[in-house]
Image (tube, rainbow, N blue to C red):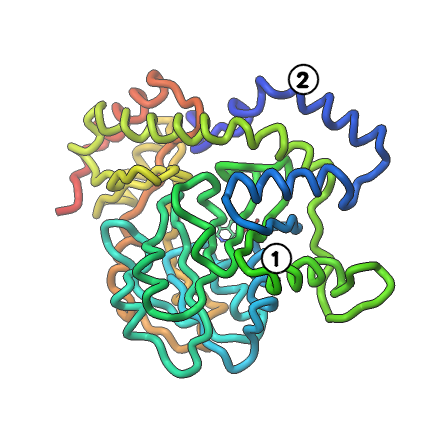
Amino acid sequence: MIPLVDVKAQYAPLIPELKERFSDVLESGRFIFGPEVEAFEREAAAYLGVPHAIGVANGTDALVLSLEAMGIGRGDEVICPSFTFFATAEAIARVGATPVFADIDPVTLNLDPDDVAARITERTRAIMPVHLFGRPAPLAELAALGLPLLEDAAQAFGADGIATTGVCSTFSFFPTKNLFALGDGGLVASTDDEVADTVRRLRFHGSRDKKTFELVGANSRLDAIQAAALRVFLPHLAGWNQSRREGAARYAALGLGEVVELPLDEPGHVYHMFVVRTPERDRLAAALGEAGVSCAAYYSTPVHLQPAMRSLGWEPGSLPETERAAAENLALPLWGGITEEVQERVVAAVTASGSVPVV
Ligand SMILES: Cc1ncc(COP(=O)(O)O)c(C=O)c1O
């Protein structure tokens, strides 16, 4: 079976180096915070071009802590996409605020700034764009709407032009992400000194010194072992992202676009997922499964129609482009280092299914 993403193929050549770094952590006896985490935070901040990077336990906590540090809570509204992973809107609800869903641009699958503008009210406190599937959201257009941005960059470490516009930008290091840990991990990048300081306190029970607790926070830390792995991987990220971009170009060169609609390429896109569209998605998915090619719909039920969001009152049909994308998208195998031979087999299986592109 061809996997959707082969994480092990990416890290296998680095296992000797990982073992050495883990051995250093074992020798140090420091597993929580400490020099590995601090060094990773410095390296991540430099990579992203931001003044602050704060390691946390996962990408969901990164969103919750950022919202709290930005002072967002009960009675506030935050505009976000519905065509995203559930955690984007869940984080808004977790801090007591209301997620207000805006529709997406059907070509980029990212937030449509015009639809966002139409949903701004006097209660709107922030806009939360998602750099979906590794494609940068239209940050300049969204920033021009005059509200603070919180970038959900869980899927886009290394994408061009991200993380320097938002007050905070959040990352997930779930093992399938472009930059990944060997377990859970996350990061808040921030352009704002005060907000960053608050995130730093919130991730450790609202305390700077473990003695005085100034805020009600959380226990949300990045482990030294994960930071050590992330430090091994970070120097390889640009190469992995380049390989993903080459894989996407190769799918086009192999003629995949004659059978399904391909994602529009852009220089900054880092292809966390390679997501195609076809009105016959379910038939294609079944045919690929039989042909031994993994694929997955991201996301087949948009967030506004999930049971947990029912109390917000969104009806089917309220976000047409989001709902159409949810019915037509299909992620095909792609990872840093994917081979031409694997991609040829994927294209052959898609072609054999007889799917037709979206018109
Ligand atoms: C867009 C988006 N936001 C948030 C998250 C949450 O990250 P985590 O799983 O690390 O909590 C993810 C990934 O899972 C994601 O894809």
Residue holding disc 2? 16
Where 187 falls versus 244 (above or below)?
Answer: below
Upstream in the sequence, badge 2 or badge 1?
A: 2
Report which quarter residue 145 is drawn in: bottom left
The foreground one among 94 and 24 is 24
Does 34 appear above or below 288? below
**What residue type is disc 2 on?**
Pro
Task: From the top left corner, tell me how far across and down residue 84 is, in percent.
Answer: 41, 55
Q: Dot 1: within a 10 Å radius of its alpha carbon, few (fewer than 14), some, or many (20 or more) residues?
A: many
Q: Which mark is residue 61?
A: 1
Q: Residue at x 74, y 28 (%)?
A: 22
One can see residue 323 in this view: no
Image coordinates for residue 190, horizontal then vertical, percent: 55, 55
Q: Residue at x 73, y 21 (%)?
A: 20
Q: Is residue 174 above or below residue 351?
A: below
Neighbor class of circle 2 (other Cα within 10 Å; few <14, some 14-19, many 20+) is few
Confirm if mark 1 falls within 8 A of ligand 1. yes
Amino acid under label 1? Asp
* Dot 1: element: helix
Judging depth in this view, the residue of 163 and 325 nearest the camera is 163
* Drawn side of residue 177 relative to residue 243, left or right: right
Q: Residue at x 21, y 24 (%)?
A: 253
